[in-house]
Image (tube, helix red, strand yellow):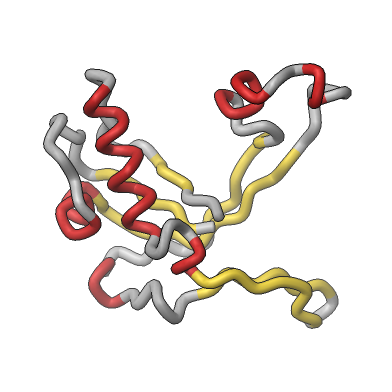
Amino acid sequence: KIAFRLHKTSDGAVYTRGSVADLIDAVYPAIEIAENWYGDFAARGTPTLSADDSFHKACVLGPAQPDLEALDFAVLSGRVRIDDKEKASVPGVAVMGHPLEAFAWLANLSGARDAQLNTCNLIMTSR
């Protein structure tokens, strides 16, 4: 996963991949710690699972990358390694074609609902 930390509050503007970058203070490599606290999660229904991000317990962030322009999301990939063997790999472009597309979508959805993404929020993308 890729996480973005905001240094500016969204203002209800219509954001694009390029303009949403102005809200970002730093980019982090991130992993999600999952936990099933529902038991039979199928009985909870899609709205509940979506609202709660299903199994999210916590996240672990790697070192901050403050220079967004230095990152090429077309070649970045997240990898899972166990005992030095790669078990999975997902390119950054697997997130809606570009992680900033997902971030712009969230900022636009928030604005359409008269909500804001706030300074210091951490936004995690997911494939």
Number of residue marks: 0
Q: Is residue 25 above or below residue 52?
A: below
Please tell me in which quadrant of the rendered image residue 106 appears.
Answer: top left
Say whether residue 85 is left or right of residue 15: right
**At 26% across and 53% down in the image, what residue appears?**
25
Estimate the x, y position of residue 65 in percent, counting from the top left.
Answer: 36, 66
Estimate the x, y position of residue 53 in percent, counting from the top left.
Answer: 60, 33
Q: Is residue 25 above or below residue 34?
A: below
Which sits in the foreground, 12 or 119? 12
Please tell me in which quadrant of the rendered image residue 97 appears.
Answer: bottom left
**At 25% across and 52% down in the image, what residue appears?**
24
Q: Is residue 61 above or below residue 42?
A: below
Estimate the x, y position of residue 127 in percent, counting from the top left.
Answer: 55, 55
**Image quadrant containing the N terminus:** bottom right
Say whether residue 6 is left or right of residue 74: left
Q: Is residue 64 above or below residue 111?
A: below
**At 53% across and 51% down in the image, what residue appears?**
126
Estimate the x, y position of residue 31 in percent, counting from the top left.
Answer: 61, 55
Say whether residue 127 is left or right of residue 44: left
Say whether residue 93 is left or right of residue 118: right
